[in-house]
């Protein structure tokens, strides 16, 4: 018992010394009403350093990931705030570029259904039609053969067993509906593959993407593609050379591919005579800017 009492007294004295040392390290100007929990939080956040403003400020205070500001909130370093600002700026620029490309695609592209359907390979269209005819012939033949089944008439659908012609028409309608559904999916996949190639995108990547999303998400892969696809290359209005949708100037004649109104600075089309946003006379403005340029030349 005496030995146990000595051990307990030693642990109590050691704990008292630790509390006293921690109390001496606290700054003198700290409010006495501050809770013990907030003080321990500041100690943990500052990675071993005592509270802000104290004599025992951390040695690597400038390199820490964060610290407590005057309001008691955790704030990042200047580098972190700068990186976050740069990231937000990049996201905004990417979103604005995507909107600009969508507007350009709407203005430049005048697509027609049969023109777009024409980019699907002809051999694929013939193959799908041939498979449809084969499926229709097989289904009708097997269904008519079931009418002479030794075990009894087993035609489909059961309600039309007494009328083979109507039963064959009903079965042909079911086969046609199923074939149309499969044909739409096949043609859409082929269209994505060919359209991505002519737009300068990765045809294999987008084809794999729509195929992966097809079983679980249906047509969501095609929707993503139609929203994210690049505009088609178009001829330069000045020299006729094919230019990409992201080009600002023609690499052949240095033509400005995205002209803007001199007054409101908003993007206009090459054929506009007046600005659609502010009504500025573009012909007179362009002529006034070309005359001084010729004089200096």
Image: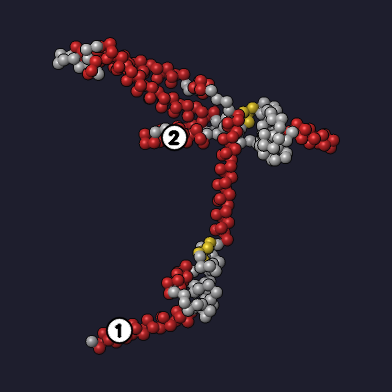
Q: Quadrant of residue 253?
A: top right
User: Crowdedness of circle 1 by 10 Å Cα count: few (<14), some, many (20+)?
Assistant: few
Q: Is residue 151 left or right of residue 196?
A: left
Query: Residue 202: x percent and y percent?
Result: 50, 34
Q: CA distance from mark 2 to mark 1?
A: 71 Å
Image point 80% across, 35% down: which residue?
288
Pick out the residue farthest to the left. 151
The answer to whether residue 256 of the structure is visible from this angle is: no
**Quarter of the image that includes the C terminus:** top right
Q: Is residue 22 left or right of residue 287?
A: left
Q: Is residue 148 left or right of residue 209?
A: left
Image point 18% across, 14% down: which residue?
153
Pick out the residue farthest to the bottom. 2
User: Crowdedness of circle 2 by 10 Å Cα count: few (<14), some, many (20+)?
Assistant: some
- Disc 1: which residue: 8
Query: Residue 169: x percent and y percent?
Result: 31, 14
**Observer-nearest residue: 43 or 289?**
289
**Are the residues at dot 2 and dot 1 in contact (C-beta closer than 8 Å)?**
no
Residue 165, above or below 43: above
Element assignment for label 2: helix
- Disc 2: which residue: 221
Q: Is residue 267 left or right of residue 221?
A: right
User: Marks 2 and 1: which is nearer the front?
Assistant: 2
Image point 44% across, 28% down: which residue?
189
Element assignment for label 1: helix
**Quarter of the image that includes the N terminus:** bottom left
């Amino acid at each position: 018992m005496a030995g146990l009492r000595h051990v307990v007294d030693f642990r109590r004295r050691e704990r008292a010394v630790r509390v006293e040392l921690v109390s001496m390290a606290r700054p003198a100007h700290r409010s006495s009403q501050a809770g013990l929990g907030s003080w321990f939080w500041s100690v943990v956040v500052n990675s071993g350093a005592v509270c802000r403003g104290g004599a025992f400020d951390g040695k690597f205070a400038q390199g820490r990931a964060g610290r407590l500001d005057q309001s008691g909130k955790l704030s990042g370093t200047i580098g972190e705030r700068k990186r976050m600002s740069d990231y937000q700026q990049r996201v905004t620029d990417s979103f604005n570029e995507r909107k600009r490309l969508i507007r350009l695609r709407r203005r430049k592209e005048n697509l027609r259904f049969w023109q777009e359907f024409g980019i699907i390979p002809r051999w694929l269209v013939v193959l799908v039609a041939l498979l449809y005819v084969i499926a229709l012939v097989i289904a009708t033949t097997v269904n008519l053969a079931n009418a002479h089944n030794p075990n009894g008439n087993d035609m489909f659908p059961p309600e039309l067993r007494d009328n083979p012609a109507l039963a064959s028409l009903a079965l042909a309608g079911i086969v046609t509906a199923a074939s149309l559904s499969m044909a739409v999916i096949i043609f859409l996949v082929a269209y994505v593959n060919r359209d991505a190639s002519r737009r300068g995108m990765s045809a294999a990547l987008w084809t794999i993407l729509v195929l992966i999303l097809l079983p679980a998400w249906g047509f969501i892969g095609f929707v993503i593609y139609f929203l994210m696809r690049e505009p088609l290359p178009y001829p330069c209005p000045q020299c006729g050379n094919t230019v990409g949708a992201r080009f600002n100037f023609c690499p052949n004649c240095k033509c400005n591919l995205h002209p803007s109104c001199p007054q409101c600075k908003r993007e206009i089309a090459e054929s506009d005579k007046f600005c659609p946003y502010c009504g500025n006379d573009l012909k007179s403005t362009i002529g006034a800017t070309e005359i001084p340029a010729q004089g200096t030349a």
